[in-house]
Amino acid sequence: MAVEVRIPTILRSYTDGAKTVEGGGTTLAEVIDDLETRHAGIKERLVESGDLRRFINVYVNDEDVRFLGGVETPVKDGDTVVVLPAVAGG
Amino acid sequence: MRYDSLLDSVGNTPLVGLPRLSPSPNVRLWAKLEDRNPTGSIKDRAALWMLVDAEKQGRLHQGCTILEPTSGNTGISLAMVAKLRGYRLVCVMPENTSSERRQLLQMWGAEIVSSPAAGGSNEAVRVAKGIAAEHPDWVMLYQYGNPANAAAHYEGTGPELLADLPSITHFVAGLGTTGTLMGAGRFFREHKPEVRIVAAEPRYGELVYGLRNLDEGFVPELYDETLIDARFSVGPRDAVRRTRQLLEEEGIFAGISTGAILHAALGQAARCVEARQSADIALVVCDGGWKYLSTGAYEGTIDEAEDRLEGQLWA
């Protein structure tokens, strides 16, 4: 079971500069826990009291997880998880 | 159709069917042509509403200077309205926006302050807030937090869509200031709550997300996620591909952000087909492609176009 996770520039200090890392699990929360075992500290930057941090957006196959199941959003082999900081448009 | 002045002609844009892009006779796509507004974009609605609202509140008087952080369209719309109403406009714009946008702003008489490319509109907002602090007499309309921005769509875009397409099932629009989705979203929640509200958010190159730390992220004050049902992130490749497809199949020459919106709308349409649901999906054509010709999005291969858009604020 592997999910591709794309890491934004600002969090690459946790992944030795890697743009993408692999994670395992059946939900986003499990994938983040799995990442934490190899990239210590990253979880705390993504999650706060069990929810995604306000200025972090996470997309599974391009869909914002806040409208799917939040950190409990199911993921499966081959899915792509994109992590991005929230930015302004307009 | 006759209007007393250009400003009176804002809104009431055509809704056209997209018969070739619609996947089946029961799942139909409709495009709201916001490029038909006076300066060629949906932002004329918000600009007019924010400015008139500020006048009503007594925040603006003749000769006032208006200040606004904008990546382009809002500034161009405000420049036109400000010129006609007698105000000076200063726009704070990221330097990685297309040259056409700068030229248009200057044509309508706006002054431009450039903000650094890294950080995109977040930086423009930060710089504008700094300038506002130095010039307390200047008026910042602040599209990201001004309820009149959303009101323009609550009073205009939403009711126009429901009148033209009473069978509407989905509304798909771009997510920038969130004004369009918040205003039309609230209108549909109140008047036809079964309409699903779908957001298409442009995903830029890494430069744009180059924040110093995560606490500098930005969520517009207008944003209320309960008014949205799904939110898709669309990268430049899909946006360009769909922009070209819209021209090729339906003859509509739109800007790149519209390609991102079409991508989300087609994804939604495919889901409806799969679920054997009938659907009338309305999407926004935010502006025409004219202002983006210099980005190279319309020539060469998709790979080349994608490379050229890297680092640019294309929506």
Image (tube, coloured by chain):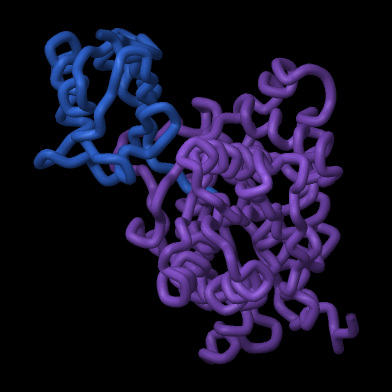
Chain colours: A blue, B purple
Q: Position of residue B209 (x, y in %)?
A: 46, 33
Identify the residue at horizontal 83%, vertical 19% (top origin).
Answer: B300
Q: Quadrant of residue A42?
A: top left
Question: Is B290 above or below relative to B214?
Answer: below
Identify the residue at horizontal 76%, vertical 33% (top origin).
Answer: B245
Q: Is residue B221 visible?
A: yes
Q: Position of residue B294 (x, y in %)?
A: 82, 34
How many marks are shown on the rendered structure?
A: 0
Q: Position of residue B302 (x, y in %)?
A: 73, 20
Q: On the picture, is B216 further left or further right than B52?
A: left
Q: On the picture, is A17 further left or further right than B244?
A: left
Name the residue nearer the viewer: B81 or A79: A79
Question: Is A15 above or below relative to B232?
Answer: above
Q: Position of residue B247 (x, y in %)?
A: 82, 39
Question: Is A23 above or below relative to B2?
Answer: above
Q: On the picture, is B126 further left or further right than B89?
A: left
Give the residue at the far right of this rendering. B2
Identify the residue at horizontal 66%, vertical 42% (top origin).
Answer: B24
Q: Is residue B119 visible?
A: no
Q: On the picture, is B123 further left or further right than B60?
A: left
Identify the residue at horizontal 70%, vertical 28% (top origin).
Answer: B241
User: Where's the N terminus of chain B, which quadrant?
Assistant: bottom right
User: Where's the C terminus of chain B, which quadrant?
Assistant: top right
